[in-house]
Amino acid sequence: MKKIKPSNEDEMVYEFLKMEIYSERYKERIEAILAEMQIDHDLITNGNIMSAQENSLRVEILKRFRGYRSEELFENFPENIEWMWTKFDKEDISKILYIEYSYWNELSNYTGSPLEAAQMILSGKIV
């Protein structure tokens, strides 16, 4: 793994939401939260991470969407994190493990391995 450049929580939240809003699995949920909060989807798809107001709104969206900072996907999430953009080598993939989460457990055949999950997906497994 090679460290490219530092990042921060605001950028992580922005990028997390940006990927999820394009996901078939989560798009409707995020759009419902945006409608409830009366916020345009541009906050996620074309936002400004230098804006404290936008960052605050995105944190609130992620909180409602996935329990950010303490619940659901983010239960037991550490507080002191060094956010970093990185580049992984092919060899690094075998060292990566998913977080402890029911979806990833089942998809990876309870190994935590993305490589195992890829095999399960290719074999037609749906979680």
Image (cartoon, rainbow, N blue to C red):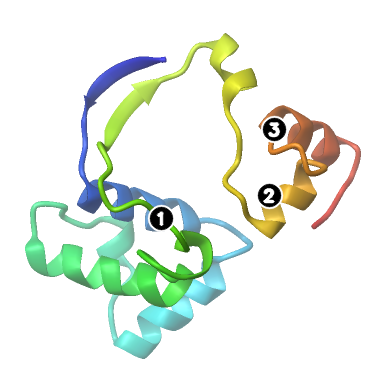
Q: Is residue 71 above or below residue 46?
A: below
Image point (33%, 57%), residue name: 45
Amino acid type assigned to the residue bearing label 2 in the image: Trp
User: Can you tell which quarter of the image residue 114 is in?
Assistant: top right
Mark before the other along the chain sequence, 1 or 3: 1
* Left/right of residue 31 with respect to residue 60 in the rendered view: right
Crowd around label 3: few <14 · some 14–19 · many ≥20 (10 Å): many
Residue 2 lies, in percent from the top left, at 35, 13
* Residue bearing the label numbered 2: 104
Amino acid type assigned to the residue bearing label 3 in the image: Ser
Image point (53%, 75%), residue name: 29
Crowd around label 1: few <14 · some 14–19 · many ≥20 (10 Å): few
* Residue bearing the label numbered 3: 113
* Residue bearing the label numbered 1: 77
Q: CA distance from mark 1 to mark 2?
A: 16 Å
Q: Quadrant of the C terminus?
A: bottom right
Q: Secondary structure at mark 3?
A: loop
Residue 78 lies, in percent from the top left, at 35, 51
Q: Secondary structure at mark 1?
A: loop
Q: Is residue 113 above or below residue 77?
A: above
Residue 84 lies, in percent from the top left, at 28, 31
Viewer-nearest residue: 39 or 77: 77
